[in-house]
Amino acid sequence: MPIDPNHPLVHFAPELGVAIRTPVVTLASPTMDELARLAERAGEGIHAPDAMPFSTAWTRGSADEVASRVVRHWLRTVGANEATPIATLPFVVFHPTEGPIGVQDLVLARGWPSLATVSTGSWLTAAAQGRGIGTWMRRAVLTLAFRHLGAARAETTAHADNLASRRVSEKVGYREVGTSIALVEGRERLLVHYRLERGDVEDDPSIIVTGLGPEVLKRLMAIPAT
């Protein structure tokens, strides 16, 4: 289960109490036990050994090495840090019967909120892939960004051969806006860039955001522009 919104930690870091509920999954902050459980699942492998769907090859290595990266990513990025110009809001994805099954990040652009752009990144455990969950995860954080944070647009990037990720973006309504070349594991990889304008997506009333009180909004909107 996600962290209890009445937990003492939420009092000191209220962004930990933000949750997004969809008809299929809930995005929220985890307890430490749930974070460890998710990390162990990631260590079991989330893609074919000969594939690399990420620009940073964090899924390479032993099960413990991969699990450690999951935990450290969460601890490093949780919440809005007023001392930096970039804030990442990391959510763990919870299935009602399967528990923690992935991560969905919402990244506020460098220059936020003057530059009202957000981007996203995500991953799912192998067992959770191919079930439409990725689409709900993306729609969830877009609801937070567009409905509550005043974002004007969302951007995302996928490897050209990562068809599952590209299908999610296209299903949600993103438009392809260009390509670039990145070096991944010593090889050139083609990246496809997508953009979604706020006016191109309809708000979904079935997606509910909770825990987004005045203190959280103040911390998010006070991130210094550069």
Image: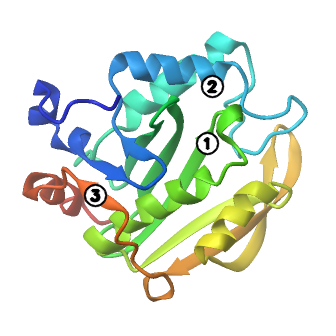
Labels 3 & 1 near each other (Cβ < 8 A)? no
Q: Quadrant of residue 13?
A: top left
Task: Please say if the residues under marks 2 and 1 sit with CB atoms less than 8 Å apart.
Answer: yes
Using a 10 Å C-alpha cutoff, classify the residue at mark 2 as few (fewer than 14 neighbours), some (14 to 19) or many (20 or more).
many
149 to the left or right of 218: right
Rendered location of residue 84, percent (x, y)? 31, 49
Residue 39 lies, in percent from the top left, at 54, 21
The first of marks 3 and 2 along the sequence is 2
Residue at 61% x, 21% y: name it.
41
Residue hosting label 3: 209
Q: Which of 110/100 is in front?
A: 100
Q: Is residue 113 above or below residue 57?
A: below
Quarter of the picture containing the C terminus is: bottom left
Q: Helix, strand or loop at disc 3? A: strand
Kind of residue at disc 1: Trp
Task: Identify the residue shown where x is 16% and y is 42%.
Answer: 14
Q: Which residue is mark 2?
A: 42
Residue 20's disc is none
Amino acid type for the residue under numbered disc 2: Ala
The disc at residue 123 is 1
Helix, strand, or loop for circle 1? strand
